[in-house]
């Protein structure tokens, strides 16, 4: 099959995944102090973090235009696209609009998936798509199996700061008040594409220990699944989490990626996102 996988820049990839999956990434934009940063390979994430830390205003983000997706829809007759949750961004609707424009222009197959997640969740959907394509499933089978995978996927995260998510309206003020209490570390998660509070835990070490337990309570059939961890300048945390999970569960594989611009903007330094 002549195919191409397209995703937005919330899909965090490491070098190995970039080479193997060859995903066409459509960048979102990040605006800080009226300066726009494009979330592509030219972006220096550490510089972006420094700018955000030193700014008195909160960063804003902008979805890719339909024309940005149209460019990435070129180069193959069959396109599978994945976007950040439609509940968090207009990226999905713009990808669908681009699909409709492309179909009017010529004979092409395009299907757009709403990942109902972000960051490493979107990454795992990309891997799943790649595996199904490599196994020569037909297009309907790929769509059905991927939609089922998205529905069953679990996403959790622990952040050092929820300030950006609160001010951007991604989570409510009640959660923010909980997070601001002394020594309380919220474990957050995805709920049909929106962000929810999973548990309140006292202390960071206890929160990560509890997160490892939650993996076992919320998941099953680990030997057939990949678990992914995305981190924002927190490689030691990510590696320690990986080792603790390996001690308790037999996942097919556990991968670690660094967050790029979009995820970094909301996760902030020290943030960890996990999906399986």
Image (spheres, grey):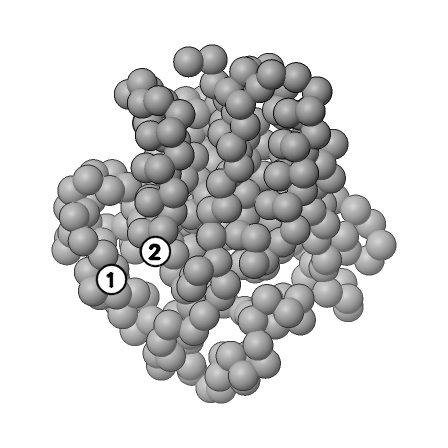
x and y percentages locating residue 175 in the rendered image:
51, 79
Asked if the residue at tag 2 contacts the one at tag 1, i.e. Cβ–Cβ closer than 8 Å, the answer is yes
Q: Residue tagged by mark 2?
A: 154
Q: Is 17 rendered above or below residue 85?
A: above
Q: Residue tagged by mark 1?
A: 218
The residue that appears at 54% across and 43% down in the rendered structure is: 83
Q: Is 29 rendered above or below residue 143?
A: below
Q: Is 61 rendered above or below residue 101?
A: below
Q: Distance between the residues labelled 1 and 2?
A: 8 Å
The residue that appears at 63% across and 66% down in the rendered structure is: 164
Q: For mark 2, does the 10 Å Cα neighbourhood hold few (<14), some (14 to 19), or many (20 or more) residues?
A: many
x and y percentages locating residue 95 in the rendered image:
63, 38
Which of the pair 222/40 is nearer the observer?
A: 222
Quarter of the N terminus within the rendering? top left
Q: Callout 1: helix, strand or loop?
A: helix
Which of the pair 195/235 is nearer the observer?
A: 195
x and y percentages locating residue 60 in the rendered image:
72, 58
The residue that appears at 49% across and 83% down in the rendered structure is: 178
Q: Is residue 260 visible?
A: no
The image quarter containing residue 209 is bottom left
x and y percentages locating residue 67 in the rendered image:
74, 32
Work out whether mark 1 precedes mark 2 in sequence or the reverse, and give the earlier one.
2
């Amino acid at each position: 099959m002549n195919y191409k996988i397209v995703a937005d820049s919330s899909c965090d990839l490491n070098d190995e995944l970039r080479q193997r999956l060859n995903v066409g990434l459509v960048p979102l934009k990040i605006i800080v102090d009226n300066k726009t940063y494009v979330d592509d390979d030219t972006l220096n994430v550490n510089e972006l973090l420094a700018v955000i830390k030193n700014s008195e205003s909160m960063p804003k983000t902008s979805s890719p235009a339909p024309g940005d997706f149209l460019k990435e829809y070129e180069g193959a007759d069959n396109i599978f696209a994945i976007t950040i949750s439609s509940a968090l961004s207009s990226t999905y609707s713009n990808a669908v609009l681009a699909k409709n424009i492309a179909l009017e222009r010529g004979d092409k197959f395009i299907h757009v998936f709403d990942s109902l997640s972000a960051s490493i969740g979107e990454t795992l959907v990309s891997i799943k798509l790649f595996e199904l394509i490599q196994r020569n499933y037909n297009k309907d089978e790929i769509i059905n199996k991927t939609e089922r995978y998205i529905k069953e996927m679990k996403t959790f995260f622990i952040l050092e700061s929820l300030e950006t998510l609160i001010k951007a309206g991604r989570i409510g003020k009640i959660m923010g008040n909980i997070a601001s209490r002394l020594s309380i570390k919220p474990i957050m998660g995805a709920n049909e594409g929106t962000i929810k509070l999973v548990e309140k835990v006292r202390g960071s070490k206890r929160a990560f220990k509890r997160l490892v337990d939650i993996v076992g309570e919320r998941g099953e059939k680990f030997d057939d699944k990949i678990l992914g961890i995305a981190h924002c300048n927190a490689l030691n945390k990510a590696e320690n989490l990986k080792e603790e999970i390996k001690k308790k569960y037999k996942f097919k594989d556990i991968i670690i990626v660094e967050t790029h611009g979009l995820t970094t903007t909301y996760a902030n330094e020290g943030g960890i996102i996990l999906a399986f």
